[in-house]
Image (cartoon, helix red, strand yellow):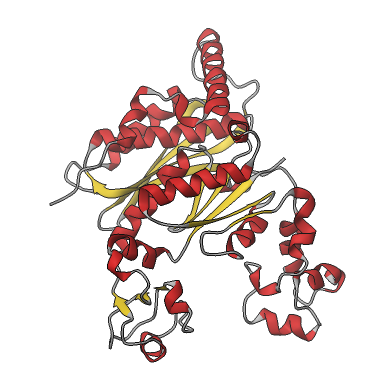
Amino acid sequence: MNVLFHLDLDCFFASVETALHPELGGKPVCVGGLRGQRGIVACPNYEARAYGVRTAMPLRTAEKLLPREAVFLRGNHRLYGEYSRRVMTVLESFTPDVWPKSIDEALLDVGKCLHLWRHDPETMASAIKNRVRAETGLTISVGIAPNPLCAKIAAGIRKPDGLVLVRHDMIRDFLTPLPVDVVPGIGPKTIPRLNMHGIRTIGDLLNRKQHMPESYLSGLLQSLLSEEPYDGGGHHHDEEEQSISRDRTFSRDTQDDGQIAATLFALVERCCKTLRAGGRAASTVTVKVRFANFITVQKQLTLPCAAANEEDIFPAARRLLKELLPAWRFVRLVGVKVSNLVPLEGQQLMLDTVRTERLETLHRRIDALQERYGYRSVRWGIAAGEEREPQREE
């Protein structure tokens, strides 16, 4: 049964500023620009929202609504990126199945490690919230549900610092009274048309699904009520393109070859675990690098034989990385994609049968240990460098 956590950092940009500058506590704060500047509000804190300020509101409109003691800040996106990475690192210490959805949101599949918390998702979610607060000073709202869309809605209805659990037998009762505008994908242009048909709540939508005024709504409803096994969409797995990809943005731009290679290995490891779990092997490896100036380059390599293990995929990925990396450039992001997927069963994996059987046995045992005791209970030696603080240009 699916157990998915959607985690949403509360008023992220403004909360980072308050965590660094406690004197801002209790004051309305708007991140996006200074007083008198043209532009829009990127993130108001809850004190500012109490005066009617909203994200994307013109700064000058926000100034008129807020009292004189309100604080306006330009913002620091590099800083917010560092905090986001710190939060994602905390999440990855609980489960390897962490899929960032944006700088301040992530989806976690905790089904394989929930036994470590006596099968109590609320206890696990509370532990995550406490760790995030202790290590970053930020609060996070968590929605727990059997499908991603329902979990995202649950995370948003009791902010800030909320925790909402929707069990598989509670989905319809949970959704029915909620207004339709809480559903991601139903925007301000659609709501008036729904209202014209007497649809104001999700319950109204469920009861009128045979007469949808918008054809795409039936797909949204199916996603809201889904209890199908989670297909790993957070791994960026595209059924049509037949690929699985992972990437990592460094907390600081780095030239540290060891740091970059260790991070690449960790990404390859996650892709391989997904391949093995799905009974597939990959024929093509692609590595992507984004430099500090945001220029992005990538190269791909076709393997001699389809593979699903780190020993065969990582050397290819590392070769591509070396070809992409000039010695003098600082790196912002590294990513890896495995594609052209084929069934794992029956594949002649690179070398002799004895080696293949030994590798399969090794990875089966490692995967089982990580599933039982947590992802970081067993690590490859090269992956240890993933945690080192990257270098930074002075």
Picture coordinates of residue 116, whole percent (x, y): 58, 31
- Locate residue 362 relative to residue 225 in the image: left or right: left
* Residue 261 can be seen in this image: yes
Q: Residue 214 lies in what quarter of the image?
A: bottom right
Question: Considering only vertical position in the picture, is 49 above or below 287?
Answer: below
Quadrant of the snapshot with the N terminus? top right
Picture coordinates of residue 311, whole percent (x, y): 43, 22
- Identity of the residue drawn at 32% across and 53% down: 82
Question: Considering only vertical position in the picture, is 49 above or below 6?
Answer: below
Q: Which residue is situated farthest in the top direction here?
A: 354
Residue closer to the observer: 310 or 285? 310
Q: Residue 243 lies in what quarter of the image?
A: top right
Q: Which residue is situated farthest in the left direction here?
A: 394
- Locate residue 203 relative to residue 309 in the image: left or right: right
Question: Considering only vertical position in the picture, is 157 above or below 291?
Answer: below
Picture coordinates of residue 179, whole percent (x, y): 70, 73
- Locate residue 6 relative to residue 314 in the image: left or right: right
* Residue 242 can be seen in this image: no
Residue closer to the observer: 277 or 162? 162
Picture coordinates of residue 220, whole percent (x, y): 71, 63
Q: How many badges with numbers are in the image?
A: 0
- Identity of the residue drawn at 63% across and 59% down: 154
